[in-house]
């Protein structure tokens, strides 16, 4: 007897994946023959910031076929967020483990994105970004070093980095690391009635175009120690303060 396997037509997950891919293939066939959908699907996109910009950039990336997205944010969902940040809901404003605070933004955004697109690989990292001008006491120096190492490891694993945080200071270190590791870095800023999108240049291979960290070679060769020394050089008077000691 003849048999017909109708499983692909009955499985909702497979149908959702095929429908999303079909939209991209239609654009490729009709308008963008050079669109490399396989490359887009395999690219690791790191989103630094999971707020208004992070949520909307993630949605845009997914619609263009990106399927490997990592969020990094140290904040938590507040009651004003769900109206502007579409990956969060009212229930996210209260964490079951700590009812007085919201759920972690990065982890929640990653989980919600996986529910919207079945085959997306989405991870959240709740890590603060060290910023110049913020004092680092002796008791917290090792913690800051660990945070810098985690941030650098995440950027090193990325194919493209998006700067989507809500302050200029928090964009300084990731932009430095992106250039040091030769990663394409896209800086997005949002104003009241304006916005800015800027792509940082990638230095040529072996060209020494990256920033130099004190005590290291070109491209931030000083590693974590070089970054901390850069921070001390930028604001020595403030870093001399040790509020934690």
Image: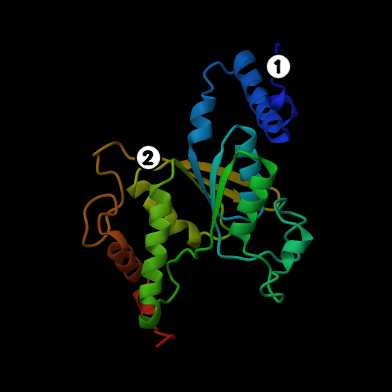
Seen from the viewer's position, the closer of residues 148 and 243 is: 148
**Residue at disc 1, secondary structure:** loop
Please tell me whether mark 2 sits on a helix, a strand or a loop: loop
Q: Is residue 29 above or below residue 24?
A: above
Give the crowd class for mark 2: few <14, some 14-19, many >=20 residues within 10 Å. some
Q: Position of residue 118 (x, y in %)?
A: 65, 40
Q: Which part of the image, by quadrant, shows the N terminus? A: top right
Residue 4: mark in rendering: 1
Give the percent coordinates (x, y) of residue 245: 39, 88
What residue sits right under mark 2 in the picture?
A: 202
Spatial CA span between label 2 and label 1:
52 Å
Closest to the observer, 203 or 47: 47
- Residue at image location 57% in from the left, 55% down from the top: 49
Q: Is residue 153 left or right of residue 83?
A: left
- Asked if residue 217 shows in the view, the reply is yes
Location of residue 13 with respect to 88 vertically, above or below: above
Taking the spot 71% from the left edge, 66% from the top edge, the residue there is 78
Give x and y (percent) for residue 209.
Answer: 29, 44
Q: Of discs 2 and 1, which sits in the foreground?
A: 1
Which mark is first along the chain, 1 or 2? Answer: 1
In the image, residue 114 above or below residue 78: above
Residue 10 position, x and y percent, is 75, 29
């Amino acid at each position: 007897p003849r048999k017909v396997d109708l499983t692909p037509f009955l499985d909702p997950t497979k149908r959702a994946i095929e429908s999303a891919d079909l939209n991209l293939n239609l654009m490729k066939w009709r308008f963008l023959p050079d669109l490399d959908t396989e490359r887009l699907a395999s690219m690791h996109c790191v989103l630094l910031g999971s707020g208004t910009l992070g949520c909307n950039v993630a949605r845009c990336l997914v619609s263009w076929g990106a399927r490997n997205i990592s969020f990094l944010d140290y904040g938590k969902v507040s009651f004003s967020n769900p109206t502007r940040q579409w990956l969060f809901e009212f229930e996210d404003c209260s964490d079951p483990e700590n009812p007085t605070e919201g759920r972690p933004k990065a982890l929640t955004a990653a989980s919600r994105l996986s529910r919207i697109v079945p085959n997306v690989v989405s991870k959240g990292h709740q890590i603060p970004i060290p910023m110049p001008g913020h004092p680092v006491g002796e008791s917290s120096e090792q913690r800051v070093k660990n945070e810098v190492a985690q941030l650098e490891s995440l950027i090193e694993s990325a194919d493209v980095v998006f700067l989507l945080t809500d302050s200029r200071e928090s964009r300084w270190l990731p932009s430095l690391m992106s250039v040091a590791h030769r990663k394409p870095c896209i800086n997005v800023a949002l104003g009241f009635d304006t916005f800015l999108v800027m792509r940082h240049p990638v230095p040529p291979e072996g060209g020494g175009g990256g920033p130099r960290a004190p005590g290291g070679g070109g491209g931030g060769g000083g590693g974590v120690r070089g970054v901390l020394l850069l921070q001390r050089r930028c604001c020595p008077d403030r870093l001399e303060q040790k509020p934690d000691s």
